Image (spheres, grey):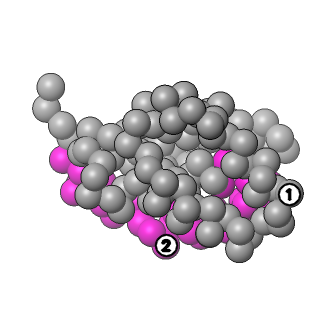
Amino acid sequence: MELPDLQKYKDKFTQQGFFDKIQRIAKRAGAKLVYVALILYYMIQSDKVSLKDKAIIIGALGYLISPLDIVPDAIPIAGLTDDLTVLLYALGKVWTSVDDEMKKQAHEKLSKWFDDDEVNIAEDLFAEDSTDTPV
């Protein structure tokens, strides 16, 4: 199976576009969605993550920041469920590549946007057993 050329998608997914979208939807989306998105974002930065996993992540994050959605983000509650579903699916596929440093980076960023209670709820995403999958 040939891996896609990730360079052709480079300008579709930008760091600024990602953080702009996350900041716009953060409170409405909730800490869980933002935490998953941040972990996936930090996974892209790692040289320990395979190109195959990065392709999955870019697809999921691209869907998140894309203005085209199956369920438009403007619809209360339901509008972001498709985004969360896509992100959780992608995280489940690449879960074995998530390390403590990625979680730490995501946690630090999340702590800037949410209060402690919301951050703790988001952290419940991860089971104590590292062989478990998220959620």
Secondary structure beneath label 1: helix
Left-right relation of 115 to 41: right
Q: Quadrant of the C terminus?
A: top right
Q: Amino acid at mark 1?
A: Asp
- Is 19 contained in the magenta span? yes
Assess disc 2: are there few (<14), some (14-19) or many (≥20) residues with their C-alpha within 10 Å of its C-alpha: few
Asked if residue 110 can be seen in this view, the reply is yes
Asked if residue 74 can be seen in this view, the reply is no
Residue located 21% across and 40% down the image: 4
Disc sitting over residue 117 in the figure = 1
Residue located 18% across and 47% down the image: 5
In percent of width and height, residue 89 lies at 52, 31
Q: CA–CA distance between discs 2 and 1?
A: 27 Å
Quadrant in which residue 14 is drawn: bottom left
The magenta region covers 5-34
Disc sitting over residue 16 in the figure = 2
Q: Nearer the viewer, mark 2 or mark 1?
A: 1
- The answer to whether residue 9 is above or below residue 129 is below
Sequence order check, earlier mark of 2 and 1? 2
